[in-house]
Amino acid sequence: MDASSWDNLPDHIIITILSYLPVSSRHHAGTACRSWNHAFNSPLLWSHLRVTFHSEKDVRWLGCLKRYGTQFRTVHIDCNQENVTNRKITCDFINELARLPERRLKRFIVVFSGMNPYFYAGQEMHEAIEDLFGPPPTQTNVISTLEHVDLGKLSIAYSDKLFLPLAENNPNLRFLNIQNASLVCKVTSDCLLKIITTCTKLVDLRVHYYSLSEEVLTALAEGERTPLQHLSVCCQKDDKMGYAKVWESEFWKALTDHNRALRVSLIFGDYCPTSRIPILLKPEIPVSVLRVENWHPLLYLVRFSCEHYYRTLEVLVLHTHSSPQLDQTLLELVTKSLRLRELHVYCVLAKDTVTAILKMRPGLKRITLKSEKEPFPWEPQVL
């Protein structure tokens, strides 16, 4: 290719090329010629940013934030939580993000990678995010408020103090994931009710069971709000499970009557008592994702799904024990579940069962199906 032709590439192609480069490489590429420098400084290049804080060198992202932060629409943060320096730089980045003179931020995602440090409570991270969710500084020109917030992979305990400001200052919120990786959830049903009644455009909500209540489900069924499309409920160990009337059929019926396209994800974590799972299952719940991680016999659950959830079930994940009855019932469920696109069974199945499933459902996208015992972890297979 002639050298001059690189200078004549359309801006949108140069921006696409630069978007795949790390910041340091973007800077070098931006000095190649006038058109590439123009693309480097384009707001379109900096509207969606994925940042990693894995070492001290990643402090350079703070300079990028100060220069281009007013153009950010999406910020995805990946922090290696094992190192205290990484956590500090991440908090500094979020604090600066909250103090930009102009704010266009609509999507905010934070994930932790690496091992969770012992006795790490994440208080400074909680406070930094709370600062971003709170009222902006008086000198900040707010052009857009948050519409998408995903904090589903942080191993810190959330509280009402974090999410009440989110509701008060971001009424256009459409996606909210607060299913943290910690076993402790302190977000009360009153706080969740405040979020729902204030943010009436929510279409995707992912919470812990602890935060639900009759009032929350009733509010989600009100006709004035945008219909809810997806509700994910993660059930872990807490004193409230199995006793409240949250799961009574009347509330689910009212919820699905208003939200005709609603799909529900039920996640039973490894600390969820097996004896309580049947109490929480209701035929009226339009379950699209069913995930059970507590390594107990689950034949009753597969039979229940075969009877009530086969019309809506798209993803099934089971950590359980092998048995001929499980193979038989699982085959029946797969036969009836025409929407099924992922199947992950973490126990050994008969070879004939695996063969029959793959023949019956050639449209499966991802599977974890083993006919012979193998060392863990078992990695999903993409078909």
Image (cartoon, helix red, strand yellow):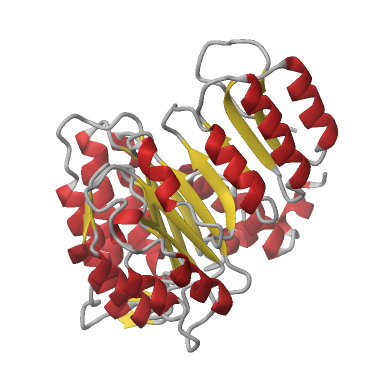
Picture quarter with the C terminus: top right
Front one among 289 and 245? 245
Q: Residue at x 35, y 54 (%)?
A: 208
Front one among 105 and 64? 105
Q: Residue at x 38, y 57 (%)?
A: 207
State the image coordinates of residue 319 (x, y, percent, origin top left). 50, 29
Front one among 354 and 152? 354
State the image coordinates of residue 33 (x, y, percent, origin top left). 62, 55
State the image coordinates of residue 364 (x, y, percent, origin top left). 75, 39
Front one among 375 and 324? 324
Residue 108, relative to residue 104: is it above or below?
Answer: above
Residue 109, relative to residue 348: is it above or below?
Answer: below
State the image coordinates of residue 243 (x, y, percent, origin top left). 28, 55
Answer whether residue 382 is visible to the viewer in this image: no
Residue 121, relative to residue 299: is it above or below?
Answer: below
Q: In the image, 319: left or right of 11?
A: left
Picture quarter with the N terminus: top right
Answer whether residue 323 is visible to the viewer in this image: yes
Q: In the image, 88: left or right of 61?
A: left
Q: Residue at x 39, y 70 (%)?
A: 70
Q: Residue at x 56, y 66 (%)?
A: 44
How many numbered marks appear?
A: 0
Q: Quadrant of residue 178?
A: bottom left
Residue 331, relative to residue 15: is it above or below?
Answer: above
